[in-house]
């Protein structure tokens, strides 16, 4: 199983259902491009703030997109990793989460925005429905690949992986990972991934 795109979403804390001011994010993402503040070749910023429950604001890159996503009524940092042919799934997953946590840390340091992201839980989305259909079989296959990375992040027996159920079979296969131990900041989780 080798999906072509992996997405990770860390929700805004303390309340992902609260309104998020997206206008300041546009300027921040433009600055991230100029300063090359995040991993990857960053190209442009797309403003979808007018779309209800939509993608919000997206920092588009060649191999990764970063965005403040508002889908499903929950604001969060959505990082979509793409263009990684030939790499092992576990390696790509670690890289995706490392990039997401680096972005969460960088955005969280912008005191004017007031955006913080919960690091004790995340959702993974697999958008390639031909490779990873929204089925129990695909979930079990992906789960086996995700468990070692979840253990790295949250510790052995200190996490739970579950399938995000949807009545709509057209939706992407999604997994929820929730840590149950001590809540570590993004910087600590980045260190754990690179160890």
Image (cartoon, helix red, strand yellow):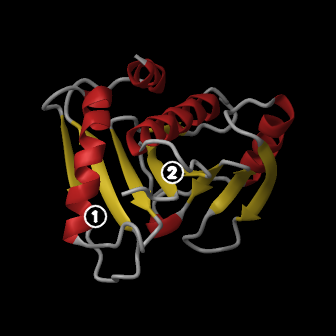
Residue identifier under label 2: 76
Residue 123 point in image, percent of width and height: 37, 52
Label annotation for residue 86: none
Secondary structure state at the residue bearing disc 1: loop
Residue 144 point in image, percent of width and height: 22, 48
Q: Relative to 117, say whether 141 is above or below.
A: below
Q: Earlier in the sequence, mark 2 or mark 1?
A: 2
What crowding class fits label 1: few (fewer than 14 Cα within 10 Å), some (14-19), or many (20 or more)? Answer: some
Q: Nearer the viewer, residue 178 or 115?
A: 178
Residue 92 point in image, percent of width and height: 48, 41
Q: Is residue 2 visible?
A: yes
Identify the residue shown where x is 39% and y is 35%. Answer: 119
Please tell me whether mark 2 or mark 1 is closer to you in this view.
1
Q: Nearer the viewer, residue 49 or 191?
A: 191
Residue 167 point in image, percent of width and height: 28, 82
- Residue situated furthest left in the rendering: 157
- Viewed as shown, does residue 8 lie left or right of 176? right
Label annotation for residue 164: 1
Q: Relative to 181, say whether 188 is above or below.
A: above
Q: Relative to 95, say whether 57 is above or below.
A: below
Mark 2 to mark 1: distance in Å? Answer: 16 Å
- Residue situated furthest front in the rendering: 86
- Viewed as shown, does residue 22 lie left or right of 167? right
Total of numbered circles in the picture? 2
- Viewed as shown, does residue 30 lie left or right of 84? right
Identify the residue shown where x is 46% and y is 27%. Answer: 186
Q: Quadrant of the N terminus?
A: bottom left
Image-quadrant location for residue 194: top left
Q: Quadrant of the C terminus?
A: top left
């Amino acid at each position: 199983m080798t999906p072509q795109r992996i997405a990770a979403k860390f929700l805004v804390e303390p309340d992902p259902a609260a309104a998020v001011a997206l206008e300041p994010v546009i300027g921040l993402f433009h600055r991230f491009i100029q300063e090359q503040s995040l991993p990857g070749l960053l190209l442009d910023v797309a403003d979808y703030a007018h779309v209800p429950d939509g993608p919000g604001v997206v920092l588009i890159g060649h191999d990764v997109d970063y965005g403040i996503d508002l889908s499903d009524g929950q604001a969060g940092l959505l990082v979509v990793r793409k263009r990684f042919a030939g790499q092992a799934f576990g390696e790509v997953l670690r890289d995706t989460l490392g990039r997401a946590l680096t972005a969460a840390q960088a955005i969280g340091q912008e005191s004017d925005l007031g955006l913080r992201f919960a690091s004790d839980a995340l959702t993974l989305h697999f958008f390639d429905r031909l490779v990873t259909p929204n089925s129990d079989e695909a979930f079990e296959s992906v789960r086996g690949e995700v468990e070692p990375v979840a253990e790295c992040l949250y510790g052995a027996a200190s996490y739970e992986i579950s399938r995000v159920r949807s009545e709509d079979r057209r939706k992407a296969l999604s997994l929820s990972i929730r840590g149950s131990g001590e809540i570590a900041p993004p910087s600590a989780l980045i260190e754990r991934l690179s160890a």
